[in-house]
Amino acid sequence: MAIQTPDRVVPDTVAILADTNPPRRPRRRRSISWGAYLGLAPLAIMLGVFCYYPAASGIFHSFWNWNPGGESTFTGFDNYATMMSDQLWWESFKNLGIIFLFGVVSWVIPLAAAELLISLRSERAQFVYRTLLIVPMAFPGVVTALIWSFLYQPNDGVINTFLKSVGLDALAQNWLGDPHLALISLLFIGFPFIAGLPFLMFYSTLQNIPKEIFEACSLDGVNRIQRLFLIDLPLMGRQLQLLLVLVIIETLQYGFVAYILTSGGPDNATTVPVLHMLSEAFNGGNWGYAAALSTTLFVLTVVFSTIVAVAKRRDSTTNVKGM
Amino acid sequence: MSAATIEAPSRQPRTRVRRRRSGAPIHIALIAIVAVGLLPYLFVLTTSVKTNEQFATSYWAPSFPLHFENYATAWNQIAPFMLVSVVVAAISIVGIVALSLLSGYVFARFQFPGRRFFFTMVIALLMVPSIASLIPLFVMMRDLGLLNTLWVLIVPRIAGGAVLGTILMKTFIEGIPQELFDAARVDGAGAGRLFRSIMLPLSLPVVGTVSLLTVIGVWNDFFWPLLTVTDNALKPVSVGLLFFRGQAGTDYGAMFAGYMIASLPLLLLFLFLSKYFLAGIQGGLPGSH
């Protein structure tokens, strides 16, 4: 049983007062200790039943030909063997790779916006621009997806109507219906990609760089572009690493936008692991196989999350406390 | 710049720096980025007050008279979904706040064997993506006979929300000076009284963050309600909108009015609580970055 000791040195005069405490402490701790377990019981039950049990059940049943409500048979690694030779599964990971790469390249715009923003002298102007830039974040994801699905519509859609009105009829496309364009169309949702975590992280990191550094730079004649590469980016190294892993985790869970706009089509051009997993379970009834796919996604996420946790522990300027 | 600094008398460089930094090019670039980002939403907003004829004749420009009855039409269809989301969010908030306040308090203020172990077990859940346990959770809910009820939306959300909630609460409560607790204890307050009179009022900022996160979560959750609720009367707003789009067909005015109504609660929260909103998105407490 750990007893909390006061970390400050108690002066002699106070020592007499402090003396009255120690004998009472252990007694109180012991009686409170049971209360502590009682206090944690509701949380333990909730997390045990609705978080730990499903996760464990998913891993367990990934080794079974799972037939919920009926007879399940143990199949060992069969589901994972099927996964290895599942063409669509690997194709969905290829799409994830493209989504990830595009995501990272698209940081250029939030980075540029953050740089422009901190170049503003007036705090008020910074606040106004920052707020306007991130307003799209406040819209529910489903609404943004539905709005963009309208922008991409072949007949009444904004993009094609615009192209036709400026005489570029030839460029009008069936954006989401063409297997060659569907994925890239999905990726452009949310353009110019400001409203998101990367922008907020870039901006807050740049804000935290001491003004003296910038002043020293301008005295030495470092121009804006040089400063970006010599000062800002190196100072952002930690944040960039963290962001990279966060984007990997986010990408692994990518799915609802593709579901709303293309449902993985056309011709499976926009299928992603999450959609494949759901269709195996809910359309194909292959619950055991879907559990194996979900376990794979889970393991990948845990691996990358562990990297984040380690990185955060080393980094004193993290945002998430208590880790 | 450096040449100017050397040549000019002492007051000159400052004004030059200012003139250069608050230059028009930066404003133009920022305005352009803002415009591109907001244009889709503005288009939807202007179209939401058009009839189909107005939409056909003036696609881009706002067209008068404004037809606010689109909003009435949309509201009639969207309102039940909104109500479900509000109810789910409200009950979830109560559950999450109660659970995480209590557990955060225990973790922060009591010493007992296994304290570290239990807290690690809570933190570890941050790594479990909701999508990974979706299928086993679905099977479990089906076995419990909870599909197509409000509880299937509420209970897993409480469990999920209590994870981050407990971590935030514990951190926050640890930051409250021990002296406050000691003073109250000297005055004869028991554990329950400490909880009610010190903890509860002081932890309101965290309660705010947790509540906001819950609302955002309910409004954005998609696959879970899509799979577990097929009864239209129990669909929350995220899934309900999809159904609504199907119903609206090509009546774009009403369709977009519906999108706007569905977004309004989050927009208002963003407007008035942007500090908490951003903190929530970055997974922390307001003022921690």
Image (spheres, coloured by chain):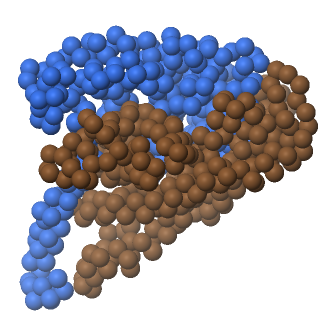
Chain colours: A brown, B blue
Would residue A15 be visible to someone looking at this image? no
Q: Identify the residue at image location x=27%, y=37%.
A: A155
Q: Is residue B190 left or right of residue B245?
A: right
Residue A34 drawn at (x, y percent): 83, 27
Q: Is residue A142 above or below residue A126?
A: above
Q: Quadrant of the N terminus of chain A?
A: top right
Q: Is residue A300 above or below residue B169?
A: below
Q: Identify the residue at image location x=66%, y=40%.
A: A277
State the residue in front, A322 or B72. B72
Would residue A276 be visible to someone looking at this image? yes
Q: Quadrant of residue A43?
A: top right
Q: Quadrant of residue B67?
A: top left
State the residue in front, A210 or B239. B239
Residue A149 drawn at (x, y percent): 37, 37
Q: Is residue A313 above or below residue A150?
A: below
Q: Identify the residue at image location x=85%, y=22%.
A: A70
Q: Quadrant of residue B61?
A: top left
State the residue in front, A1 or A311. A311
Q: Identify the residue at image location x=51%, y=13%.
A: B232
Q: Is residue A282 left or right of residue A190?
A: right
Q: Is residue B11 left or right of residue B169?
A: left
Residue A42 drawn at (x, y percent): 73, 24
Residue B225 drawn at (x, y percent): 57, 24
* Numbered marks: total: 0
